[in-house]
Amino acid sequence: MVILDGKKISNQIKDEIATEVTQMKERGEKVPHLAAVLVGNDGASLTYVGSKVRSCKRIGFESTLKHLPEDTTEEDLLSLVNDLNKDPEIDGYIVQLPLPKHIDEQKVLMAVHPDKDVDGFHPTNFGKMALDMETFISATPYGIMELLRRYEVDTEGKHAVIIGRSHIVGRPISILMSQKGKAANATVPLCHSRTKNIKELTLQADIVVSALGVPHFLKADMVKPGAVVIDVGITRVEDKSKEKGYYITGDVDFEKVKEKASYITPVPGGVGPMTIAMLLKNTLLARERHRGNA
Ligand code: NAP
C-alpha cells in the first residue's frame, strides 16, 4: 500500500512555483498577486485563508487579505468584488466559502471576473473545464488529478466511483476523470444521497473518490482489494481531550481501508495540501495570462 502524500507533493509543487517566481524577479517582472476575501470569523475559513496567505509568502507571491465583518451587506461585498476585478495589481482572488446566510453566494461568485477566478467556480471556467479547454480548474479536483499524475496511478479504462456531487468537488472530478488524458480515461459513476446501494458500486471500483463530509462513511467492506482510495472529506469532530477542542477526520475509515487499498490519501496530509498548491498554480497561470494581455 502506498500513501499518496499530498503534503510532500504540494511542497514539490510550491518549490517549482517558487523557482519560477525567483526567475520572474530576476527578469524584473511583477510577481503573482493573490487576494483572498473573507467575510466573518468562521473558524475553518480563518484556518484555510491563513494557510493560503502563508503559502503565498513562502513561494514569493504578493498576497492581500480582505477580511470583512460578518454583517457585511451583499451590496458592499459585490462592490469589493468589482474593485478587485478592476485592480491591475491583483492577478487572481478567491472569495472564501461559506458566506454568511444573508449573502447570495451564487450572485457573488458570478460577479468574480472569470480571468481572476483562480478558484475556477465561475460558469465560464467550469464550462471551459467541461469542454477540455485550458482554464482555471477548481483547486481540489485539480489537486486530486495532479496527485494521481505524479504517483503515476493508472486510471485508463478503470472504474472510478465518485461519492458526492457538489459543484466544487464531486461533479468536476467526475468530469475530469472521464475526460481523455493522463490520470483520466476512466469510467465514472457519480453517487449522491439518492443513490441506491452505494456499496454495490464502490465494490466494483478500481478508484474511489469520497467527497461527502461524513466521517468514516467508507468502510473496509465497501472497498475492493487493491483499490485506489482518495479521501476528500474534512470534518471537525469535537474532542475535549485535544488542545483545539476538535480533531480533523476524513470520509474514509483509514486504518481499516488502508489494509485493502493499493494507494490511499490520509486526512490530514492528502488532498487538503494539494488544494492550496493548485490554487497557487492557478494564480501563476493568471499572472502569465495577464502579462500576455499586457
Ligand atoms: P457538499 O456540498 O456538502 O456535498 C456533499 C455531497 O455528498 C452531496 O452531493 C451529497 O448528496 C452527498 N452525500 C451526503 N451524504 C451522503 C450519503 N450518506 N450518501 C451518499 N451521498 C451523500 O460537500 P463538498 O463541498 O463537496 O465537500 C465534501 C467534503 O469535502 C467536506 O467534508 C468538505 O469539508 C471537504 N472538502 C475538502 C476539500 C479539501 O481541500 N480537501 C475541499 C473542499 C471540500 P446530495 O447532493 O444528494 O445532497
Image (spheres, rainbow, N blue to C red):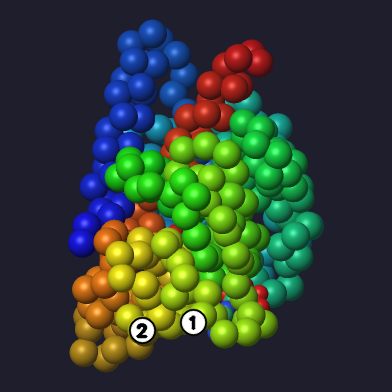
How far across and how far down the image is residue 278, in percent?
A: 44, 43
Q: Residues within 10 Å of mark 2 (few under 14, many from 20)?
A: few
Q: Mark 2 and mark 1 in contact (Cβ < 8 Å)? A: yes
Q: Which one is nearer the viewer's eye here, 41 or 270?
A: 270
Quadrant location of ligand 1?
Answer: bottom right
Q: What residue type is labelled 1?
A: Lys
181 to 291, vertically: above or below: below
Q: Is residue 236 left or right of residue 240?
A: right
Task: Check disc 2 and report the residue beneath it.
Answer: 221
Q: Please give the name of the residue rendered at 25% of the width and 80% of the height, measured from the top-left corner.
A: 256
| Label located before the other in sequence (1 or 2) | 1
How far across and how far down the image is residue 290, in percent?
A: 61, 22
Quadrant, the C terminus:
top right
Q: Please give the name of the residue rendered at 62% of the width and 31% of the height, measured from the top-left corner.
A: 134
83 to 27, vertically: above or below: below
Task: Check disc 1 and report the residue beneath it.
Answer: 199
Residue 90 visible, this angle: no
